Amino acid sequence: MESLYHFAPFTGYAYPNESVIPWTVLIVVYPYLTGLVAGAFTVSSLYHVFGMEQFKPVGKLALLTALCFMIIVPVPLLLHLGHPERAFNALITPHWTSAFVMFGYMAGFYVVLLLLENWFVFRPDVVRLAREKKGMMGWCCRVLCLGSYDVSAKAMHYDRKWIFALAVIGIPAAHGLHGYVGFVFGSLKSREWWSSDLMPAIFLFSAVISGVALLTALYVLSCWLRRIPVDLKCLKGLAYTLWGFLMFTLVLEGVEFGSLVYKAREGTEMILEYVTGPLIVTFFILQFAIGAVTPVVLLTFMIWRGTTGKALVAGVTLSACLVLFSVFMMRWNVVIGGQEISKTGQGLLEYQLPIFHREGLVAAVAVLVAPLLLLWGMARLLPPWEQNAPSPPSVGNIAGGV
Amino acid sequence: MKPDNKTSFAARRAFLRKLGRTAACAGAAVGGGALGVMQTVAAKSEPASSQQSSLIPDYDWTKHQWAFGVDATKCIGCLRCVEACKVENNVSRDPHHFRTWVERYVYLEGEDRPRIDSQHDPVNIAASGSGGEYRFANRYQDAKVEKAFFVPKLCNQCTHPPCVQVCPTGATYKTVDGVVLIDHKYCIGCQYCVQACPYGARFFNYEKHVTDKCTWCYHRITKGLQPACVEVCPVGARIFGDLKEKQSPISQFIRNNRTRVLKPETGNAPNVFYVGLDKDVL
C-alpha cells in the first residue's frame, strides 16, 4: 500500500486525510504549460493582429510553439486522474457548476483554433514542400495540404483574412483558458492561500511573461543553432514586452500578498509562519529575488543604458530564462504551497516529491520536455523561420511600437 | 504597397463589421442567459439529486431528512467509532485515510493555545504500535492540564456542498434525504472535491482510484439501522436520526440543546450539529 501514495509529514495539526497531498507536481506543470501557450499566443497576436512588424521573425515560431505546448497540456491532467479512461465523462455529462468542466471544451476549441491558424500560416510552405519533396515527407505534406494547392495572391489574401480572424478569436480563447486556471484555484474557499479574487489575473499576467520569455529563449537558441545573427529589433521588442508585463505581474502579486497580510483573517498567522519558514527559499529567494526582481533590474538597466549587440542578447536571454524559472516557482508555490498549509490553519505539511512514480519528478520532467521535442520535430517538418519561406505579411499594418 | 494596404484595410473593416454584428447578437444572448447561468453555478443553488425515487427497494428518500449530532462533552476518545467505521466501510488500514476521526484539544497551564492532535499523529501511532490500530497516547500525563476535550469529526453532508459544486462529472451528488454520495463507477479521480472540502472529510481511495468519504453509512440508514459509529459509541456522544420525525433522537438533540456547526462562515450549511465546542475547535 505504501508505494501507491506518498504521505506528507506534518507539524502542528493537520486533518488526518490531508497527510496525502492531493495535487502533485503534475498539477504544477499543467498551469505552467497552459501559461506558456497563452504567452506564446500573445506574441503571435502582437504580430498577426496588432501588426507589430518587429515580431515578424518570431510570428510563426510563436504559433507553432503554442500548438506544440497545447497538444501536451492534457497529458499532466490525464496522468494525474485516478481514472483517465473516464476523462470524457466531464465532456459527455458535464456538471456545469464545476470550474473544471470548461477546461475540456475550451481546450478542445483552442486546439482546433491553433491547428487552423497554423494551417493557414504554414500553407504556402506546405504547398511548396508538397510539390518539391518526394517519399514520406512529400506524402505527409500532400495530406497536410488538404487538397488546396492554390497559393495565388488572391488565395493568400483570403488566407490572411482567416489568420487575422483566428488570431482575434484566439486572444480571448487563450487568455480565457488560462484565466480560468487561476479561477480553479482562486474560487476555492477552503484554502486561504488560494482563495483570492486576484488569482485569475495573476495567473494570466504570469502566463504572458512566461510565454514571452519562452519565445525569447527559443528564438535566441534557434538563431544560435542556425548560425544566423539575432534580429535585435525583434529581441528588443520581446524585451520591452517582457519588462512591461513583468512589472505589472510583480505589482499584482505584491497587492495580493499585501491584502492577504493586511486583512489578517483566520489562518493568516500560519501562512506567515509558512512563507517566512519553509517557503522562504522557494517564494522569496527563487520566485521573487532571483526569478523576478533580478530580470526587472537587468532589463531596466539595459533599456536605460541602451545596451545593444551581444550584451543585449545575453542579458535578455538570461532575463528570459530567469522569468521562465520564476513562473515555474510561482506555480509550485501556489499549487504545492497551498496544500502544504493545512486547512486547519494550525499545521504545515511537507510535500514529498517521488522520483519514479506516475506523478513523480521523472514524469514531470518528461511532460515538460515533450512539447519541446514536439516543437523540434514540427520545426524540422515546417521551418517557422523567415528566410526559408517568407510568411504572408500581417493584415494589420499599423506600425506599432512597444 | 498602397493598394495592398487598401485591400487589407477594407478586409479588416468588413471583418470588423461582421464581428460587430456577431458580438451584438452574442451580447444579447449572453445578457439574457447570464442570470440563468449565475443561478446555476452559484454555490447556494446546488440542487439535490433530481431523481425523485431512490434505487433502494422499500426505501422512499423523500420521506427522510437525515441529520447528525455530536455531544463533545460526552466523548471519551476511545476511538471505537474510528475502528467500527474502518471495518464497516472497508477503509484502508493506514493512518492517512479516515471517514471519521476524533480530535483531542488539550490546554496546558501557561499556554494560550490548545495542543491539538488526532489518532493519526505519529506519537499516537507509535503508542498504538501500528498504523492500522488507533488510540490516544497518554502524552500529557506529566503536564499540568487546565482543560481537555475530544471532538469527533465526520462528513458534514452540507446543504450547499462545495465538493458537489466542483465535481466536473456529477459523480458526487446530494441525495434528496440529505446525504452527499459518490458514484465510484463514474468518478474520474481528479480530487477537485478533496480540495474544495474545508473540513478535510474527503480522501483519495488508492484501491479504487476514486475519492471517498463518510456517507453516514447510507447502506445502513436506508435499512433502518444506525451508522456504525453511532452504534458503537459507548457514551452516546454521536446522535443520528431523521429531522422529519419530531421525536427522533436528532430532533430532540437539536431542540433541547444550543448547537453550532463547524466553519459556518463558509456558507456550506453543514448538517452535523455540535454541542460542547470551544472557540478553538477547527
Image (cartoon, coloured by chain):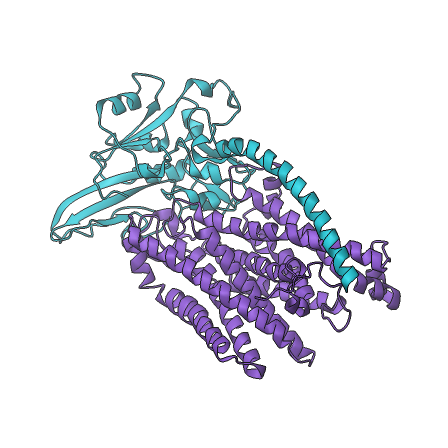
Residue A389 as seen in the image, left or right of residue B123: right
Q: Position of residue A316 (x, y in %)?
A: 54, 75
> Which tint was used for chain A?
purple
Residue positioned 51% across, 32% down in the render: B35
Residue B122 visible in the picture: no
Q: Where is A41 relative to B79, above or below?
A: below
Residue B208's place in the image compared with A309, above or below, is: above
In the image, A105 versus A2, the foreground residue is A105
**Left or right of A136 on screen, residue B81:** left
Residue A137 x/y as whole percent: 82, 65
> Which residue is depicted at the point 52% across and 38% down?
B184
Based on the displayed image, in which of its 4 quarters is residue A67 positioned? Answer: bottom right
Q: Tell me, by letter, which chain the rendering colours cyan.
A: B
In the displayed structure image, the side of residue A111 where residue B89 appears, left or right: left
Q: Position of residue B147 (x, y in %)?
A: 14, 44
> Of A241 and B121, which appears nearest the observer?
A241
Q: What residue sits 39% from the left and 22% below the top?
A: B65
| Viewer-nearest residue: B138 or A232 | A232
